[in-house]
């Protein structure tokens, strides 16, 4: 205790004394970084730390976009399957009408009475019109199914792009950690280069390329 001429220095007290003395003493490694900061520049450690935080934030956004596009691809593929099933049902209905029309034509051709023959002809004409309407509906459903399939493939392509961009940014963060540990400038430059590549891939994903 200081009242008895005795004082115990804690870690905080040591840091305060170190700062008051201008960073001189045994901690020469931090002194050079402090001097760089006081000179108006940012130390390598601080610069990498800030860049890593930015890269991690962008990577989180890319990861979210990758998950969202994957979910959309699954939803669109499901819609395509539904429309394809509906189209198949319409074609089955079309086949049923074709069978009925064929039977009506047979009955018309074999009828001996003109009145009955005329009645069967009316049914043949009705089946023909129904077949045309069913065929139009079936083809429309097939077109919708194809559009959903195309959108699903586009979303999956985007998902792969977002996943690639996220992976590259993760590599950049790993290089940042190595640069912090080793203080190697080439690793720092590599971090920035890989991060730029990840951002470029993210731009391609955003542009649907």
Image (cartoon, rainbow, N blue to C red):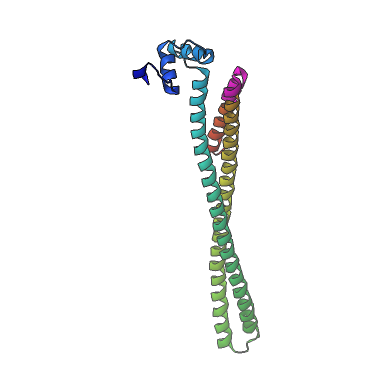
Q: Residue furthest bottom?
A: 113
User: Is residue 206 something one can see in this rendering?
Assistant: no
Q: Residue furthest front?
A: 4
Using the image as rendered, state which of residue 149 and residue 68 is in the foreground. Answer: 68
Find the magenta span and give its range: 179-193
Q: Residue furthest left?
A: 3
- At 58% from the left and 40% from the top, the residue drawn is 163
Residue 42 part of the magenta segment = no
| Residue 53 at x, y percent in the picture | 49, 30
| 172, above or below 39, in the image | below
- At 57% from the left and 45% from the top, the residue drawn is 154
The image quadrant of residue 95 is bottom right
Residue 185 part of the magenta segment = yes
User: Is residue 157 something one can see in this rendering?
Assistant: yes
| Residue 102 at x, y percent in the picture | 64, 77
Magenta span: chief secondary structure: helix
| Residue 140 at x, y percent in the picture | 54, 60
| Image side of residue 139 versus residue 9, left or right | right
- At 65% from the left and 85% from the top, the residue drawn is 110
Using the image as rendered, state which of residue 89 and residue 69 is in the foreground. Answer: 69
Using the image as rendered, state which of residue 30 and residue 189 is in the foreground. Answer: 30
| Residue 190 at x, y percent in the picture | 61, 23
* Quadrant of the rendering where the N terminus is positioned: top left
């Amino acid at each position: 205790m200081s009242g008895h001429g005795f004082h115990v220095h804690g870690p905080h007290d040591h840091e305060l004394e170190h700062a008051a003395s201008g960073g001189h003493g045994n901690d020469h490694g931090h002194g050079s970084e402090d001097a760089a900061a006081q000179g108006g520049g940012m130390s390598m450690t601080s610069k990498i730390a800030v860049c890593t935080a930015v890269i991690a934030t962008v990577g989180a956004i890319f990861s979210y976009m990758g998950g969202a596009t994957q979910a959309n691809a699954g939803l669109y593929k499901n819609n395509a399957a539904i429309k394809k099933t509906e189209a198949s049902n319409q074609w089955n209905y079309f086949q049923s009408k074709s069978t009925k029309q064929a039977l009506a034509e047979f009955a018309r051709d074999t009828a001996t009475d003109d009145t009955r023959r005329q009645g069967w002809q009316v049914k043949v004409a009705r089946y023909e019109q129904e077949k045309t309407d069913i065929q139009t509906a079936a083809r429309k459903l097939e077109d919708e199914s194809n559009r959903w399939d195309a959108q699903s493939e586009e979303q999956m392509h985007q998902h792969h792009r977002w996943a690639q961009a996220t992976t590259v940014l993760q590599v950049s963060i790993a290089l940042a950690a190595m640069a912090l540990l080793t203080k190697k400038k080439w690793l720092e430059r590599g971090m920035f280069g890989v991060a730029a590549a990840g951002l470029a891939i993210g731009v391609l994903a955003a542009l649907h390329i």
